[in-house]
Amino acid sequence: MSAKKNILIVDDSEFVRNYHAYILEQADFHVMTAMDGSDGLEQLFANQCDLILTDINMTNMDGYEFIRRVRAVAKYDSLPIIIISTQSESTDKSKGFEAGANLYMVKPTTPEVMIENIRLILSTN
Ligand SMILES: [Mg+2]
């Protein structure tokens, strides 16, 4: 049995998925990846997940819709969700929080800040 926390990365950029996965694995998290919101929902429903790190701009299903659909499922009421997006407008952030995100990070961020935020949210959840 592994005590590693499972993090689901949802991003349409393969480069970003791999980069974030590398950062999280270096910090001793177990990582799952999905390429858009609908893929993310499939991954979430099929696996144990402790936290979601999601992009906003994705084809097929964007991050807002993905988060709304996650929050619509009672068992994911308090699952920590972090948005990481290049969109830095306050309206984007508002939409993210309205959809149900716990935190909004703007890309690019540093690995240190990302890990710090994830650990903080996991420890208070
Ligand atoms: Mg994107």
Image (cartoon, rainbow, N blue to C red):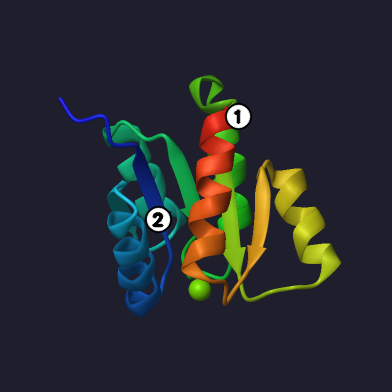
Residue drawn at point x = 60 percent, y = 56 percent: 83
Residue at the outermost right position: 90
The residue depicted at 58 percent of the width and 50 percent of the height is 117
Image quarter in which the N terminus is found: top left
Tell me if mark 1 has few (under 14), some (14-19) or many (20+) residues whose alpha carbon lies within 10 angstroms of its own: few
Asked which secondary structure carries label 2, the reply is strand
Q: Which residue is mark 2?
A: 9
Which sits earlier in the primary sequence, circle 1 or circle 2? 2
Residue drawn at x 41%, y 34% is 50
Q: According to the image, label 1 marks what residue? A: 124
Expressed as whole percent of the image width and height from the top left, the position of residue 49 reads 37, 35
The amino acid sitting under disc 1 is Thr
Q: Is residue 69 visible?
A: no
- Amino acid type of the residue that numbered disc 2 sits on in the rendered structure: Ile
Q: Position of residue 67 (x, y in %)?
A: 58, 45
Task: Name the residue at 46% across, 64% down.
Answer: 60
Q: Between label 1 and label 2, give the one nearer the viewer.
A: 1
Give the left or right position of residue 15, taking residue 115 as reference: left
Image check: 44 left or right of 121?
A: left
Q: Is residue 66 above or below residue 2?
A: below
